[in-house]
Structure formats: C-alpha cells, structure tokens
Amino acid sequence: MRRFLIATVMVFIGSSAYADGGHNHHAVPTLNKQVGSKITYGENTATLTFGPIDLPAGHTEGDMGDSMPRFNFQLPEDKYLVGFRSAISTIDGKELPRNYLHHILMINNSKPSLTCPGEPLFFGGAGLEMAETQFPDGYGVKLAQSDKLMTVVAFYHGAPPTKDVITTFTMFFAPKSKPVKEMDIYQVGVNIVCFTKFGDRPADQTDEGIEIRPGVQVHTAPLKFSVDGCVKFAYPHGHDELLMIALENKTKNQTLLRTVPDVESDGTLREFLPHQVYKDAQGFPITKEDDYEMVMVHHHILQNKELQHGMGNYLLYMTPGACPEQKKTAAAH
C-alpha cells in the first residue's frame, strides 16, 4: 500500500510564529525556487492560486512536504465566508490526484483562536480529503477588511515528477444584501491541535499524527469546551487507514458526530462523501459544563510493516450560546 503522509489541516495552525516568523522548531520549510501566489476576486468569491510549481520541489523537512512561501492578504471589504473549495491540477487544467496536496491552511492573524489561547484563528483549509464546504444557508464566518489573513500551502514531497502544478482555494461569500448569522470556529481532535501544547505530546505522537500499528486501533481523548455553542457544520479531517472519527457527549451519553470516510480496499482515503459531512441549520449544542470525548478508529493491514500516522479532527463551525428550540408540530386529530 502506498503511504501518503498528509500533514494535518489542524496541526500547523501556528502560534504568533506565523505572524512574526520567530518560531524555528516547527518552522514551515520554504522553497529555494520562488513561485507565485495570487488572489482574484469575483462578485462573491475570492480564489487563491498557488504556483505553477514543479513537483517534487526538491526541499523537504522530515516528512512534512514542500511548502510554498506564506501568502499574506487582506480582503477589500468586510465579507462573510459561507463555503470553500480546493483543487489541484496542472496549469493546462489536467486534474491531479488529491494526495499530491499536503495541506492548505487559512489563518486569521487578527483574531484569536477559541480552541488555543494565544494562537491565531484557523478558519478553513483542506488536507487530503479536500471536502467541498457549504455552510447551512444564512450562516457564515466574518472576515473583516482589516483582518490580516494568511495562507500556508504544502505539497506532498513524494509525488512523482510533475510539471507546472497549481493549487487553488476558492472562498465563497454571502451577497451584501443577505443577512448572515456569524459563526465561531472550534478545533477538536484526538491528536493535540494546539501549537503551544506540542511539548506535551506523548511519545507516539508527531507532527504527522499518532502511530498506527498493525490491526485495528482505537484512540480516544477527553475534551472540555471553553465556550457554549451550537454546531451547524463540522469539517472532518483524516489520514489513510482511518475507519471512523466521532465526537461524543459523555455526560449525556450521546454520540454527536460519527463520520466514516470513503476508502480504497487497502485503506487509502478517498474522501468524505457529502452525507458524511455534518451540516444542519438546527445544530447540536456543546457546553462548558459537559464532558466530551473524541474517538478515532484505524485499521492498518497486517502485511504492511511500515508505520502509519493517523489523525481524527473536526473544525466545528458554531453560533455562540444555546441552539434554538425546535418547533413542535401540532398533534394530528
């Protein structure tokens, strides 16, 4: 089985290091060959284009991939993000396998993270799964004109030689005339998701994820939320050999999210099909008082002696406070 070590969309959210470049231990590698990045605007869209670049790019740092220079930008006016889509191809339009992409990370250096105090907000992105995202109608993430936004993009350094590769990340915005309820973002995962806590990781956990040994492995991690909220959308992220990720309320004995990816026969992750990506305007509540648990299940085929590294993460998009009460239907007579 081919092993694609896809760096997490969650792990490289960064600390203020991304803003000031002062962090070295987990620094994102840069390419010797300078390649371009640009942003173009439509009526209610903004498309970031990275490249063209020839792969492999010839610079690696461990297994963390070939990273392009960070791209900093600001929007021309206040916008509400209502969805996003990523793609990878050659410059002439030939679609490439999604596992050529290591990760795209979208970071707001002007807004603090709810999940990780002292770190900037990670508001979107993509890993191998490249799931197309569309929030429930009437909900969005505010990106202000004054916000200092940044993108980090990395390609898989094991990709076969490929000329003129480009990656795009398209953000969809609500029309100016449309009222939007603002959502916050909260990261959860079995692996540690906060940059400032990397030093506390157990020995079997690296930047690539948690070691997955032969056979079935179940990993869990306790979770306490720092805010009350109502989750409207959950963006899943995983690596090869993932069977399931889940979020459970242990206090109320409820499974809130249960997400199963579409995979190849050897466990290579294809994607999360739309019906497996949670999206609901009613939403479900999370609270500071209750105890929660993240769960991820992997199966590493026995004949593959090479270690795999797994992750199970969600980006939870939620409105602050309690969920609205469901309307009761009148009893039939």
Image (spheres, helix red, strand yellow):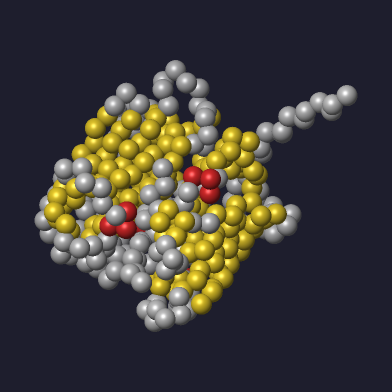
**What residue do we see at 68% from left, 33% from top?**
324
**Which residue appears farthest toward the right when viewing the image?**
333
At 69% from the left and 59% from the top, the residue drawn is 250
Q: In this view, which residue lies farthest toward the left?
A: 33
In front of the other: 26 or 179: 179
Q: Quadrant of residue 204?
A: bottom left
The residue positioned 27% from the left and 71% from the top of the image is 62
Q: Examine the rendering and report whether any part of residue 20 can be seen.
A: no
Task: Name the image quarter holding the N terminus.
Answer: bottom left
x and y percentages locating residue 252 in the rendered image: 74, 54
Identify which residue is drawn at 33% across, 30% down: 45
How many numbered circles are shown? 0
Front residue of 89 and 296: 89
Q: Position of residue 13 (x, y in %)?
A: 38, 54
For this orientation, the residue located farthest to the top is: 177
289, above or below 302, in the image: above
In this rendered view, identify the residue nearer to me: 119 or 233.
Answer: 233
Quadrant where the C terminus is found in the figure: top right
Q: Position of residue 101 (x, y in %)?
A: 29, 55
Given residues 158 and 14, the one toward you in this image is: 158
Residue 12 lies left or right of residue 53; in this view the side is: right
Q: Is residue 245 visible?
A: yes
Measured along the vertical axis of the image, is residue 182 above or below residue 211?
above
On the image, the x and y values in percent for residue 323 come to 66, 37
